[in-house]
């Protein structure tokens, strides 16, 4: 059974359909990524998942609890950071974090210490929130989402404003939390980070889920580019492009032997065979239909 389920959710705000028939699932111990262009609806979907917004149509279930009907039963098990951290400006980071863990009656000094150490926020815990830099605020915002040890952690672009070292530590923390059975859903525009830590990745475009990628399968999906002399033979189901006067056949791993045999039988000269691993960025560009690098 999926521990978090978004079922056919549509969200209309001011007559505008922001989310259209979204379905999404996340299991215990899974890190699920949500990627998509600016304005595709990621933050809105997070707001529906955390009951900030009600869906116009559809349902969200967390541990089989209908969020709209019984949110209070599960609220202490959902921690989130959506858009910017919204904490008390006049309180210190420490006071804000203590407040959250006590609010849910889940203060645990070991967890408090672990989260502060992992995110390296100890050195500015006593600084008033409105005196913190963007990166400091972001780290306290992440800490605020997990300080009460919730089972579900929802993070909207958590690595925004973090420096390189902090991003590495953040990713390590997420992996650790997942091994403890936490269900984590996060978004980011840094596709290599999403690829590194997520088990499953949903691509959102114009308020619709257009693909769901099993990251393990995607990582292991290897293709081969076979560069040959020009030929007139027709080969079904193999994409072929022309480059620098050569033909380039794009072949899946399981097709490689058959295609090499066929080329050899037909005396077609092979110049080069190149391995091509499928990155999330390539998959994203293929699905979204544009190339950021152009
Ligand atoms: N309260 C609102 N009222 C009207 N339109 C809204 C509201 N909130 C979001 N939108 C619109 O919904 C669309 C999706 O916005 P959303 O913030 O969910 O996208 P996003 O994928 O998180 O974008 P980004 O990557 O830029 O953070 C946008 O067109 C936005 O203008």
Image (tube, grey):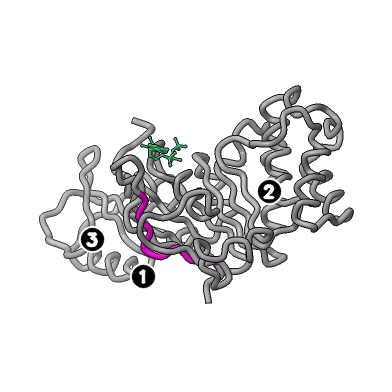
Q: Position of residue 111 (x, y in %)?
A: 83, 55
The secondary structure type at the circle numbered 3 is loop
For disc 2, the neighbor class at 10 Å (few under 14, some 14 to 19, many from 20) is many
Residue 45 versus residue 31: which sits nearer the camera? 45
Which of the image's four quarters has the C terminus? top left
Nearer the observer, disc 2 or disc 3? 2
Query: Which residue position holds label 1?
Result: 254
**Residue at coordinates 80% horizontally, 58% vertically from top-left?**
106
Query: Which residue position holds label 2?
Result: 145
Q: Is residue 171 in view?
A: yes
Residue 97 versus residue 248: which sits nearer the camera? 97
Dot 3 beta carbon under 8 Å from ligand 1? no
Q: Which mark is residue 238?
A: 3
Q: Which mark is residue 170?
A: none
Q: Position of residue 188 (x, y in %)?
A: 52, 43
**Which image quarter has ligand 1?**
top left
Q: Main secondary structure of the magenta part?
A: strand
Q: Is residue 250 within the magenta segment?
A: no
122 on left or right of 16: right
Magenta-tinted stretch: 4-11
108 on left or right of 241: right
The secondary structure type at the circle numbered 1 is helix
**Residue at coordinates 53% horizontally, 77% vertically from top-left?**
1
């Amino acid at each position: 059974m999926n521990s978090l389920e978004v079922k056919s959710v549509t969200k209309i705000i001011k007559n505008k359909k922001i989310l259209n028939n979204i379905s999404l699932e996340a299991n215990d111990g899974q890190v699920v990524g949500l990627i998509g262009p600016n304005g595709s609806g990621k933050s809105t979907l997070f707001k529906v998942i955390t009951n900030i917004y009600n869906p116009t149509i559809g349902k969200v279930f967390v541990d089989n609890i209908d969020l709209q009907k019984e949110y209070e039963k599960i609220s202490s098990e959902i921690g989130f950071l959506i858009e910017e951290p919204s904490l008390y400006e006049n309180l210190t980071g420490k006071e804000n974090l203590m407040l959250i863990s006590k609010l849910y009656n889940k203060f645990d000094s070991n967890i408090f210490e672990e989260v502060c150490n992992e995110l390296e926020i100890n050195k500015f815990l006593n600084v008033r929130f409105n005196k913190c830099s963007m990166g400091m605020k972001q780290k306290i915002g992440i800490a605020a989402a997990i300080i009460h040890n919730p089972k579900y952690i929802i993070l909207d672009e958590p690595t925004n404003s973090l420096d390189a070292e902090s991003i590495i530590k953040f990713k390590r923390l997420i992996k650790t939390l997942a091994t403890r059975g936490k269900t984590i859903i996060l978004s980011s525009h840094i596709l290599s980070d999403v690829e590194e830590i997520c088990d499953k990745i949903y691509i959102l475009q114009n308020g619709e889920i257009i693909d769901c990628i099993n990251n393990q399968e995607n990582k292991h999906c290897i293709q081969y580019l076979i560069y040959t002399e020009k030929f007139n033979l027709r080969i079904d189901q193999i994409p072929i492009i022309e480059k620098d006067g050569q033909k380039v056949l794009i072949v899946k791993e399981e097709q490689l032997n058959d295609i090499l045999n066929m080329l050899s039988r037909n005396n077609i000269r092979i110049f080069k065979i190149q391995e091509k691993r499928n990155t999330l960025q390539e998959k994203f560009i293929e699905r979204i239909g544009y190339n950021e690098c152009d």
